Image (spheres, grey):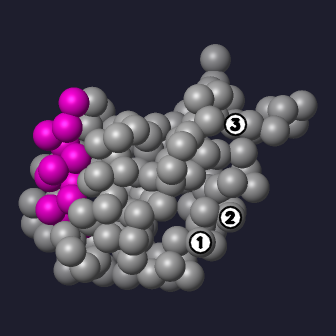
Amino acid sequence: MCYNTFMISIAIIEDDQTIAQMYRMKFESEGFAIGVAADGRSGLEMVSKHIPDLILLDLQMPEMNGTETLKHIRKLPGGQNIPVIVLTNLGQQEAPKDLAALGIESYIIKADLTPSQVVEQVKRTLGVTTDPSEQNPVPHE
């Protein structure tokens, strides 16, 4: 995925392609540049080629689960500072215990929020608002 350098980039690492494409379309309609990976290994490769502004990360995936993926991402140059929002079907009590130590911004259960609410959570995390006179999200000043 090639990102437009003038847009805020989000990496979606999600194995359910229906969900991934739903979030891709929602975020793109809000002016974000989106990269999608269908498993942890592909997500790690994508992030290593371009450090996104934020990662939406599923936990249960083939190839490499979300926790292992995040451990590897945190070791990449610049990977320590990427905000990560976990977007999963696992309840927090079922989440891996070492997840909090990996520095996640928030933990969202997919069924609890609509895509619009997830977009708003991402905007809050990034300190971004959508200026009505512009197509693309812009940082707060």
- Above or below 13: residue 5: above
- Rendered location of residue 73, percent (x, y): 22, 47
Q: Which residue is mark 1?
A: 21
Is residue 92 visible in the rendered structure shown here? no
Q: The disc labelled 1 sits on which kind of residue? A: Gln
Bin the neighbour count of mark 3 within 10 Å (Cα to Cα): few under 14, some 14-19, many 20 and up. Answer: some
Label 2 – label 1 distance at C-alpha: 6 Å
Q: Which element type, helix, strand or loop, lies under badge 2?
A: helix
- Above or below 58: residue 74: above
Asked whether the residues under the numbered discs 3 and 1 touch, taking CB atoms below 8 Å apart as contact, a structural biologist would say: no
Label 3 – label 2 distance at C-alpha: 15 Å
Q: Main secondary structure of the magenta part?
A: helix
Question: What residue is shown at x 68% (from left), y 64% (from top)?
Answer: 25
Q: Is residue 17 magenta?
A: no
- Rendered location of residue 7, percent (x, y): 63, 34
Q: Which residue is mark 2?
A: 25
